[in-house]
Amino acid sequence: MQERVKDLDDPSSEMPAVLNLTGEGKVEAEFNAYPMFDGFIRDESVENLAGALDSEQHLFRPVQLTRIPDKVDDFIGVVRALRECEHQCLLLANQGRQIRSCQMHQVAVIGHVFMRVLPVPLSPTHPHLDKCIWRKEMRYETQLDVLRLVLHLSRLYTAAIMSLPLTRALDATRMLTVGAMAAIVDFGVRIRASDFPSMFSLHMEGAAPWTGAFEQHPFGLDVTAFMVATEDMLLLAPEMSTCRSNILEYFAGQRARIPDDHVLFPIEYQAGETPVVGKGGPPQQHICASALLVQQLCWEMGFANDDHLLYVTGQRSDILDFYPEFEVYRDITCMFKFMTLAAPGTLPDVKQWFAKDAKMTWKAADDKFVVRCFGQDVKLALPDGLAAPKKESFLATLFRSNRPRSSIRGGADPSTLCGEHIASEEDVLHVKDLPTFDGKLSQSSSELLISFLTVPYIRIPLLINFFASPENINALSHPDMQRLLDSVMFEPGLWQPLGNIKIPETIPAPDRSHLATNCGLLFNELLKSPQGIMDALLRYASVIRSLLLLY
């Protein structure tokens, strides 16, 4: 290295001379003119070469889903999560040409926020009520902000999911997401603000200033139809099972405090259908509680105390203008029931929908509410489990799975598989031609399989062990068998509150309510008797390994 440095000082060296920028012999900086080089300079604007901006071709705006927090501990976190979710979903909704599957992204993001990030409020009778973040102090502006954000997200969500083809998995996601929204809004409007409580909130909770004009009772919802309609959903993730349980726990706790004549917006009974006796359905006079709530507000605040239904619909906007939380509660409740109890064939057509299409308009006609969204009237129907009772034999009453169906029927219904009415194991013996699923099963194996489906409470270990045998595992290559196993494993079945176990007093039991679970049949099996399922899964692995070695 020293030799090379010496070469730099040698005039005869081929190395370039040292550039001395300091000291006595330093080089002076100077500018020299280079003629004709100015032709390379482009001083004119080149913006005109880009052409005119196409009105349908907008700039891409980045979507940062990671800005949505994964956990919230207080109302500051709740508002931040909702606001970030709204912001990112608006970017997704307005960039359908730039982002593929933008509707599916919105469904996934909003579903994640309401099923995994935001906790469902705890029931009033929950033993750990002090841990519920929704029961901390809240200012009135924060209360309105939360309710407004949930309303906006509900419109974005329903517009996105109605733009997608229906599947059983999306059915479950849709019902649980709007159910969580309804639970949050139901509790949100009951919160007594720490600075200036809303008079609507006080009357909703039955905590308004005492008066002799009327009795103080809380108002609320009856979700019996939702409970029945979700019994055959496909809950493909554990958080979906816990979300359903938390929603039903909350509404069941609230319903225990609410008199029958204080049940709000039971519009699923407007069609005149008769609910099953003993199911706890509200009276058919669906408008009585809404009119009573408005009547109390009119008396309290001095509004004209007549035409109460027009106050509810907004045709007389006096109350909704001053109590916007009432409008949020009304629209979220109706959207919740429309997304879970829509009459067959009345869901909107699959096409590009926007949030403005999900905005609801209300009218009162012939003592009924007429609600429109997505360009059509909202029509609801009771699920099959709330239909009028039918005469059934003892075996059918004991074992039959009398569950409602979602908009797409499940694959675990033996009657659907056989094409004949199957109410019990005895009916299976009278079926002449049992399905073999393209020869994947023999007649004897098919008879055993169909028989297992007639006992919903214990069918999970029966079906798991049935397919774990080498002679039957190949049947899972058939799509119908895959759908059947999914239905058996992931449909939650009948629900009951946690710790509310009722032992039947007679045998046979009058109904199957004692076979209900809190978080679904699969959770129940894994908690009570996991060995049967785990042993079968290990045999699955062994059989599959043997098949791989053969092929």
Image (spheres, grey):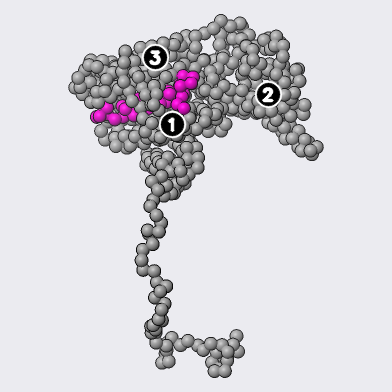
Labelled pair 2, 1 in contact (Cβ < 8 Å): no
* Disc 2 to disc 3, C-alpha distance: 41 Å
* Disc 1 to disc 3, C-alpha distance: 23 Å
Magenta stretch secondary structure, dominant: helix
Q: Position of residue 498 (x, y in %)?
A: 51, 23
102 relative to 335, above or below = below
Q: Is residue 74 visible?
A: no
Q: Position of residue 290 (x, y in %)?
A: 31, 18
- Label 1 vs 3, first from the N-terminus: 1
Going by the picture, which residue comes out furthest to the right? 550
Q: Quadrant of the C terminus?
A: top right
Q: Determine crowd level at label 3: few under 14, some 14-19, many 20+ residues with C-alpha closer than 10 A.
A: some
Q: Position of residue 236 (x, y in %)?
A: 57, 31
Residue at 52% in and 28% down:
166
145 relative to 475, above or below = below
Q: Check disc 2 and report the residue beneath it.
A: 463
Residue at 52% in and 30% down:
165
Residue 158, numbered label: 1
Q: Check disc 3 and report the residue beneath it.
A: 270
Residue 235 falls left or right of residue 550: left
Amino acid type of the residue tagged 3 in the rendering: Gln
Amino acid type of the residue tagged 1 in the rendering: Thr
- Label 2 vs 3, first from the N-terminus: 3
Looking at this view, is 125 or 472 the one in front?
Answer: 472
